[in-house]
Amino acid sequence: MGCAEAETIEETRTSHAPMWKVLFHNDDLTPMDFVTGVLMRWFGHESSAATSIMLAIHTRGIGLAGVYPREIAELKQAQVISAARPHYPLRVTLEPA
């Protein structure tokens, strides 16, 4: 199999991977700046976008951090929970996109 064929197969595998939403849930203890920082650090959002998402989480009770293939979504969920757990009860869930 040539390089072009291998690239086509890999693109097909990744382009059809089911996508998952990473959702943050509001609580009364997790500081807004912590949520904003997490959105910037692990989800790659700029400061203004992270602030907008954080405010949506705060006002609506839930907000979309990003949409990823399942393995990546699970990794991001684990990273956030690991960072939050010692101090805050931030809840992060996944659902099919």
Image: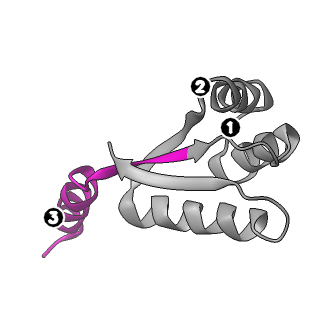
Which one is in front in this view, the residue at disc 3 or the one at disc 1?
1
- Kindly report the distance in space between the C-alpha atoms of the residues bearing marks 3 and 2: 46 Å
Q: Which residues make up the magenta segment?
A: 1-23
Question: Residue 17: x and y, percent?
Answer: 25, 56
Badge 1 element: loop
Q: Quadrant of residue 58?
A: top right
Which one is in front in this view, the residue at disc 3 or the one at disc 2?
2
Determine whether 61 is above or below 91 in the image: above
Q: Earlier in the sequence, mark 3 or mark 1?
A: 3
Residue type at numbered disc 1: His
Question: Residue 13: x and y, percent?
Answer: 21, 61
- Name the mark on residue 45: 1
Q: Label 3 belongs to which residue?
A: 5
- Name the mark on residue 95: none
Badge 2 element: helix
Residue at point 25% right, 64% down?
10
Badge 3 element: helix
Q: Is residue 61 left or right of 58 when viewed as pictured? A: left
Q: Is residue 80 magenta?
A: no
Q: Where the N terminus falls, by quadrant? A: bottom left
- Name the mark on residue 60: 2
Of 50 and 4, nearer the camera is 50
Of 88 and 75, nearer the camera is 88
- Kindly report the distance in space between the C-alpha atoms of the residues bearing marks 1 and 2: 19 Å
Q: Is residue 62 left or right of 68 when viewed as pictured? A: right
Residue type at numbered disc 2: Arg
Of 1 and 94, nearer the camera is 94
Determine whether 29 is above or below 7 in the image: above
